[in-house]
Image (tube, helix red, strand yellow):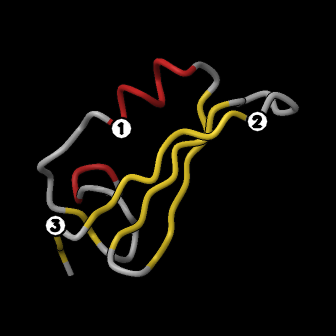
């Protein structure tokens, strides 16, 4: 099922990890996260808006094929 009910929580810095920046969001009631090596990658991903998101995968349909 596709939805626009997405909330970006933010970017969390985890200095003890190789991929130190974690982007966190929710789709419906399901939380998701993805880690990035540099903050600019996480910030670029956070700025993508307006896509319908698959509730099951937490990503736009073009990304989980």
Q: Residue at x 25, y 56 (%)?
A: 60
Q: Residue at x 23, y 59 (%)?
A: 61
Q: Which mark is residue 14?
A: 2
Which secondary structure, mark 2?
A: loop
Q: Earlier in the sequence, mark 2 or mark 3?
A: 3
| Residue ID for mark 1 | 46
Q: Distance between the Cα atoms at labels 2 and 1? A: 17 Å
Cβ atoms under marks 2 and 3 closer than 8 Å: no
Neighbours of disc 3 within 10 Å: few (<14), some (14-19), many (20+):
some
Which secondary structure, mark 3?
A: loop
Q: Which mark is residue 4?
A: 3
Residue 65 pos. (x, y %) = 32, 57
* Residue reaching furthest to the right: 16
Q: Answer with the quarter of the image where residue 13 lies.
A: top right
Q: Distance between the Cα atoms at labels 2 and 3? A: 29 Å
Residue 58 pos. (x, y %) = 38, 64
Q: Earlier in the sequence, mark 2 or mark 1?
A: 2
Figure check: 11 above or below 30: above
Cβ atoms under marks 1 and 3 closer than 8 Å: no
Q: Answer with the quarter of the image where residue 26 lies.
A: bottom left
Figure check: 58 above or below 20: below
Q: Residue at x 54, y 39 (%)?
A: 11
Q: Distance between the Cα atoms at labels 1 and 3? A: 15 Å
Pick whichever, 13 or 63, lies toward us.
Answer: 13
Cβ atoms under marks 2 and 1 closer than 8 Å: no
Which secondary structure, mark 1?
A: helix
Figure check: 5 above or below 10: below
């Amino acid at each position: 099922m596709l939805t626009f009910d997405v909330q970006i929580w933010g970017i969390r810095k985890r200095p003890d990890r190789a991929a130190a920046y974690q982007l966190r969001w929710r789709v419906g009631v399901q939380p998701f996260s993805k880690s990035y090596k540099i903050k600019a990658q996480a910030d670029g991903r956070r700025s993508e808006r307006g896509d319908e998101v698959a509730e099951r995968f937490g990503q736009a349909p073009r990304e989980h094929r």
